Image (tube, rainbow, N blue to C red):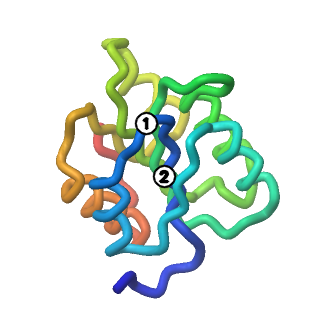
C-alpha cells in the first residue's frame, strides 16, 4: 500500500515500463503517460505531482524539454525528477543534471533502485545522484 504522499508519481515513457510502474506503486499512486507532451499538459493543469520519472527520447517533446517545463513552473521547482533512459548520448546525465533533474539511471536498471531513490526524494533526501 502506497504511503500517504500528495499527488501521483508521473511515469513518462513511450515504451511500457510495467516493472517500474509496479515498483513505484509501493511509494505513491502512479500515473503512466506515454508522452512528455501529455505530461506537460497534466503538469500545466495544476495537478498535484509527487515526482516525475521520465525517459528522455520520446516523440514530439523530449524528456529534456519536460525537465525544463517542470523546473520552469514555480509550483514544481522542487518536485523530484528522476530520469530513466536508454539514451546513447554520453553527455545525457550531465545535461539532465544541468537542467535540474535529481537522479539519472541508465536502462536497463533495477526498478527497486529507482523506487528507493524516488521514495528518498519524496521524503526529503534531496541530494542529486551525480
Question: Where residue 8 sits: x, y (%)?
Answer: 55, 69
Q: CA distance from mark 1 to mark 2?
A: 11 Å
User: How many marks do you count on the picture?
Assistant: 2
Q: Residue drawn 54% across and 61% down?
A: 31
Numbered label attached to residue 39 = none
Q: Residue drawn 23% across and 53% down?
A: 111
- Where is residue 108, by image quadrant? top left
Query: Which of these two is toward me, 62 or 67?
Result: 62
Question: Where residue 7 sits: x, y (%)?
Answer: 59, 73
User: Image check: 102 left or right of 67?
Assistant: left
Is the residue 26 above or below the residue 57 in the image? below
Q: Which residue is mark 1?
A: 15
Query: Pointers 1 and 2 in contact (CB under 8 A)?
Result: no
- Where is residue 26, by image quadrant? bottom left
The single residue placed furthest to the right in the displayed view is: 45
User: Image check: 23 left or right of 89?
Assistant: left
Is the residue 18 above or below the residue 38 in the image? below
Mark in front: 1 vs 2: 1
Q: Quadrant of the C terminus?
A: top left
Question: Where residue 43 sits: x, y (%)?
Answer: 71, 54
Q: Residue drawn 74% across and 49% down?
A: 73
The local crowd at label 1, few if under 14, some if 14 to 19, many if 20 or more residues have their Cα within 10 Å, is few
Task: Say what secondary structure mark 1 lies in.
Answer: loop
Numbered label attached to residue 11 = 2
Task: Say what secondary structure mark 2 lies in.
Answer: strand
Question: Where residue 16 sits: x, y (%)?
Answer: 40, 43
Q: Residue drawn 33% across and 14% down?
A: 88
Q: Quadrant of the N terminus?
A: bottom left
The local crowd at label 2, few if under 14, some if 14 to 19, many if 20 or more residues have their Cα within 10 Å, is many
User: Image check: 89 left or right of 11?
Assistant: left
Amino acid at each position: 500500500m502506497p504511503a500517504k504522499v500528495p499527488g501521483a508519481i508521473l511515469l513518462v515513457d513511450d515504451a511500457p515500463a510495467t516493472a517500474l510502474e509496479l515498483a513505484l506503486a509501493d511509494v505513491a499512486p502512479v500515473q503512466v503517460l506515454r508522452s512528455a507532451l501529455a505530461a506537460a499538459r497534466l503538469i500545466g493543469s495544476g495537478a498535484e505531482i509527487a515526482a516525475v520519472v521520465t525517459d528522455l527520447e520520446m516523440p514530439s517533446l523530449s524528456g529534456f524539454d519536460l525537465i525544463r517545463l517542470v523546473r520552469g513552473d514555480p509550483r514544481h521547482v522542487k518536485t523530484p525528477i528522476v530520469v530513466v533512459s536508454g539514451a546513447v548520448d554520453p553527455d545525457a546525465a550531465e545535461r539532465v543534471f544541468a537542467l535540474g533533474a535529481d537522479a539519472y539511471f541508465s536502462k536497463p536498471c533495477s526498478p527497486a533502485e529507482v523506487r528507493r531513490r524516488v521514495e528518498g526524494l519524496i521524503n526529503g533526501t534531496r541530494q542529486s545522484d551525480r
